[in-house]
Image (tube, coloured by chain):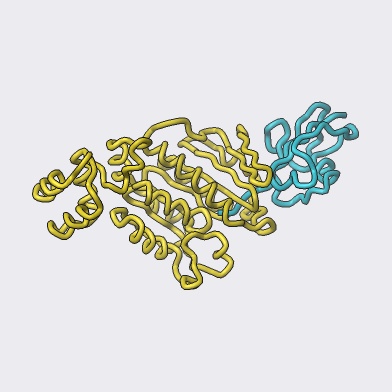
Amino acid sequence: MQITVKLYGSLCIGRFNSALCEYPDHCTVLTIVKSLGIPSEYLIRLRNGSHVQFDEVVQDGDTISLLPMLDGG
Amino acid sequence: MSGAADFIMEHSAGGLLSWQHQLEASERFGLSLAEVEGVILDKGLLPGRYQRNRQTISQADQRELFRSRVTVIGCGGLGCYVVEELARLGVGQIVVVDPDTFEEHNLNRQLYSTPEKLGEVKVLAALQRVAEVNPAVTVIPYQKAFSAENGKGLLAGSRVAVDALDNIGVRMELAEICNMMGLPLVHGAIAGWFGHVTTLFPGDDTLQNIYGPQKASKGVEASLGNPSFTPALVAALQVAEVCKLLLGQGKTLKNRTLMIDLLNMEFQELEL
């Protein structure tokens, strides 16, 4: 199935901003995160604009957005 | 005050009163510089220091800024720049809240940190600096950590709050208290080359929409650090939002989060 993956901030470094990626059916958000070599801590995860847990199963055509959790001031 | 008002009217030129005459009025009539500034603005004049504000901010708006109080929570990378810009803008009262003293690792970015000030209280450094930059502005420093317990008291009387914190959990508490108090909040966060800014009005849950249900207090700053330019830029954007909120002008970042990527010089809006 095809998933649009959008990356923001530091997560783009050495990767991409937005890409249409091929994943096996019934894969989870965590599978996608791991496939990109992104550390799972301090990570904001959106599925079609809504926050999701790592174990959420994604569907063909979904957009997964991953953002670093910015905390500095 | 009428003697001071007459003196001010007599010595103004082109709608402006020079700093020299503002000082003289203060000394001659036993008024604070803030009191003199109040009279100048009430008389429809402008202190000379704001003459380059004039094409952007009207005389009446300058008076509005002077009559406003803004609370800045956090006096670190973002907070120092926010305080500096609010003071130069002419916001009359600035409450600054931070429990910390300057440490060596602050020197790369925190405007009020210098080698001589290592170990000094950050909010007192802000007080001293504003006294030098714009002595007509009143800084009210609180050397304490913002919390759910003291938050309402720290924000009382302010028209806008600025989130310049470095802890996500406390940011959420600040947003909640602002919401309860009906206070707009300008949020900014940074790490490395990256930052984001948004403005919350009472009832907005933008921060929850950004950070989600996770109960994290820390994020990626520890791994990405913060260079000098990221806080300067994000603080400037926050102050522009504060200015618009105080003057009721322009379009704010309500329900919009401006994502800033200085590595690729990309600015994009995220609707959350």
In this view, the residue farthest toward the right is A24
The image quadrant where one finds the N terminus of chain A is top right
Q: Position of residue B266 (x, y in %)?
A: 65, 39
Location of residue B243 (image quadrant): top left
Q: Is residue B226 above or below residue B236?
A: below
Query: In this rendering, would B260 be left or right of A60?
Result: left
Q: Residue furthest top?
A: A61
Q: Quadrant of the C terminus of chain A?
A: bottom right
Give the tally of numbered discs: 0
Residue appearing at x 57%, y 62% in the figure: B108
What residue is at 25 percent from the left and 43 percent from the top?
A: B46
**Residue located at (46% from left, 51% from top):** B82
Compare residues A24 and B54 and report the one nearer the observer.
Answer: B54
| Residue A46 rendering spot, x and y as whole percentages | 71, 37
| Left or right placement of residue B1 versus residue B255 in this view | left
Q: Does residue B4 appear in the picture of this structure?
A: yes
* Foreground pick, B227 / B157: B227
Confirm whether residue B147 shows in the render.
no
Extreme residue toward the front, this view = B13
Question: In this rendering, is residue B192 above or below B181?
Answer: below
Q: Colour of chain A?
A: cyan
Measured as percent of width and height from the top left, residue B222 is found at 66, 59
Chain colored yellow: B
Indicate left or right for B191 with A40 as reference: left
Position in image of residue B36 (x %, y %)? 20, 51
Nearer to me, A7 or B231: B231
- Hey, which residue is sitting farthest left in the picture? B3
